[in-house]
Image (tube, helix red, strand yellow):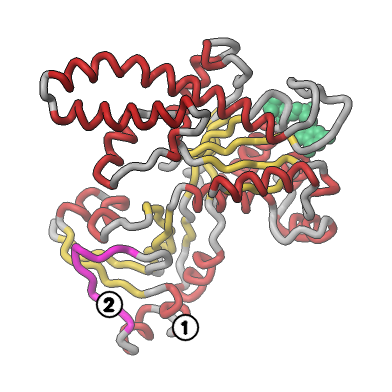
Amino acid sequence: GFKCGIVGLPNVGKSTLFNALTETAAAQAANYPFCTIEPNVGEVAVPDPRLDKLSAIAKSAQIIPTRLTFVDIAGLVRGASKGEGLGNQFLANIREVDAIAHVVRCFEDSDITHVEGKIAPLADIETIETELMLADLDSLEKRVDNLSKKAKGNDKDAKEQLDLVNRTLVLLRDGKPARLVERKAEEERAFSMLGLLSSKPVLYVCNVEEGSAATGNSFSKAVEEQAAKEGAVAVVISAKIESEIATLSREERVDFLETLGLEEAGLDRLIRAGYTLLDLITYFTVGPKEARAWTIHRGTKAPAAAGVIHTDFEKGFIRAETIAYEDYVALNGEAGARDAGKLRLEGKEYTVADGDVMHFRFNT
Ligand code: GDP
């Protein structure tokens, strides 16, 4: 599954947020037994109203949403890249996630110490990003000698890698994250093999005080502006409110959100933002037994998409009977879509679209 790591300086609200996520997962576990909960890992269902619609039309006995894993990565302090605090452990944990949710303190509270002495979200972001970039610098500099030797011996792969590493080093030395390095499509694999921390996509989570949950505040506005400049994403939430919402029933939730002037829980927005950040899309399998959502990367071809369900589906792939979500709903299900000529037979080269309702045919 896809993993999103929660990072941030101490006392910014990471644990509060993570606890809200695991409480949500625990509440979901009654309906979706696969939602596992471990001390620092929470697997939560991705809310998707389309799945409810599809299951209502097909009268599915069960609804199975797709899910996203959040990992609580505590212990980042200034100096982590030099092994201070839980430094090395922290960096190792980050290496394993697909994206980073960076929690930034945007609330004032004189009772809760800010490690850097004052509320300054942009400076906090820089502190963390700097640690990630320093760790990357260190790991790349260690590779250069070895790669140079190989490149001199006319190793073509090594030459190409060295070139990529050197371009990334230029950027890092200039204080810019590795994710901004310009690279050709064919270099993407080599780049991801470098396992650079500052190459991961980042989502800023602005933790504001309860009163600003609906509107944001001047701190969160500054983060949003910064994110827009970097082509990154920012979400405003109040971790405190989320921890309260997580304990409520579905009905209580709606009332509570309404009194706060919120349309939906911040966690739902966060989960969806994580999904968008990772460039993930959803396709559905729908029938009387179950309506289920599956996660794939945007751009995935039909056989690989089928492989997410079972490797046999990919190996023996013949075709995919495909109905666009809108057609499925407008024509009231598979039979209606078929009659209207909206059930397409797609082959191996078909790129799955977000919302496709699919039925795979395969050889066993
Ligand atoms: P972590 O160190 O980043 O995991 O931060 P915690 O989640 O442990 O939060 C640190 C302290 O800040 C705790 O006492 C929280 O109750 C408090 N806190 C978290 N979010 C908010 C908030 O939105 N407003 C206020 N006033 N306090 C908060």
Q: Which residues are magenta?
A: 342-352
Q: Which residue sits at x=83%, y=25%? A: 112
Label disc, if present, on residue 330 of the rendered structure: 1
Residue 101 seen anywhere in this rendered image of the structure: yes
Residue 243 seen anywhere in this rendered image of the structure: no
Q: Residue 124, image x and y in percent?
A: 67, 29
> The residue under label 2 is which amino acid type?
Arg
State which tag comes first along the sequence, 1 or 2: 1
At label 2, counting other C-alpha atoms closer than 10 Å, the crowd grade (few under 14, some 14-19, many 20 or more) is some
Question: Residue 299 or 167: which is nearer the viewer?
Answer: 167
Q: Residue 11, image x and y in percent?
A: 73, 26
Q: Residue 101, image x and y in percent?
A: 57, 38
Residue 209 located left or right of residue 46: right
Question: Residue 188 or 24: which is nearer the viewer?
Answer: 188
Numbered disc 1: secondary structure: helix
Residue 105 located left or right of residue 108: left
**In the picture, residue 346 is in which quadrant?**
bottom left
Question: Residue 363 or 108: which is nearer the viewer?
Answer: 108
